Image: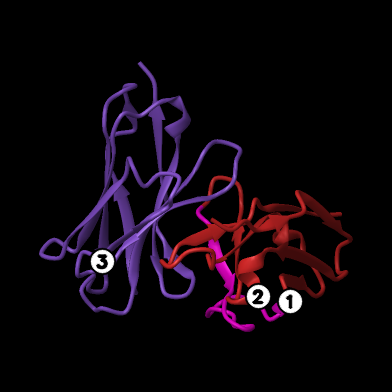
Amino acid sequence: QVQLQESGPGLVKPSQTLSLTCTVSGGSISSGDYYWSWIRQPPGKGLEWIGYIYYSGSTYYNPSLKSRVTISVDTSKNQFSLKLPSVTAADTAVYYCARWDHAFDIWGQGTMVTVSS
Amino acid sequence: SSELTQDPAVSVALGQTVRITCQGDSLRSYYASWYQQKPGQAPVLVIYGKNNRPSGIPDRFSGSSSGNTASLTITGAQAEDEADYYCNSRDSSGNHPDVVFGGGTKLTVL
């Protein structure tokens, strides 16, 4: 079955760029049936949709983060990635990648990213 | 963007029925999906569409919708159902397919 796995640094300094990658296994990211998403959850708080990407490269972002976020896809590696520049402590969260098909039906385990000097 | 509103906390006696609600304008146009999240774990989809359960989700979980309100009902709540529950839907306020989450409901099974 399809599985998602996030990877990237667990600690990022303020003002630097947060970069995460989600590797999709057990299925092709190019199948065309799904949107591939990033979601985050600050400690003790709720879920926040960051954005998603179609295999063709079309992207849709949360309006509150749109000016800062870039999501890209590498179909040859079956991966998609998140970049969030100029991070602050407010960006400290567990970051999840997930598959969207009218619902987030498959999630990665999540990766904790702490913004601190 | 639209918002989805959930009660912060709900409790239910073991074996009883509980309804968790989600309100928002986008629910007049789109079905809600529901996710269960236990401490330290990723969310798990429990209900999607009109009232569909992914494989492996017990049939005590059901969903319904009326107007701007979606509901998740657990019939005969079990101790293992104690968790945070989040609703989400598409966002109907713009021309693009944004997604919005509710703030979450903490379910306590007494």
Does residue B64 lie above or below A7 as drawn? below
Residue at 27% over, 26% down: A16
Give the residue at the far top of this rendering.
Answer: A117
For label 1, the residue is B67
For label 2, the residue is B28
Decide which of tag 2 and tag 1 comes sooner along the chain: 2
- Numbered range of the magenta stretch: B42-65
Does residue A75 lie above or below A7 as drawn? below
Q: Nearer the viewer, mark 3 or mark 1?
A: 1
Answer whether residue A5 is magenta in the image. Answer: no
Find residue A33 and report its horizontal and vertical position in percent: 31, 79
Q: Colour of chain B?
A: red
**What numbered label is drawn on residue A25?**
3
Tell me the SS state at disc 1.
loop
Quadrant of the drawing holding the C terminus of chain B: bottom right
Q: Which chain is purple?
A: A
Q: CA distance from mark 3 to mark 1?
A: 39 Å
Circle 3: residue type: Ser
Residue at 43% over, 68% down: B95
Q: Are marks 2 and 1 in contact (CB under 8 Å)?
A: yes
Answer whether residue B51 is magenta in the image. Answer: yes
Q: Which chain contains the residue that carries disc 2?
A: B
Find residue B25 and report its horizontal and vertical position in percent: 66, 66
> Which SS does the magenta portion mostly show?
loop
Find residue A43 and report its horizontal and vertical position in percent: 55, 36
Q: CA distance from mark 2 to mark 1?
A: 5 Å
Nearer to me, A87 or B105: A87
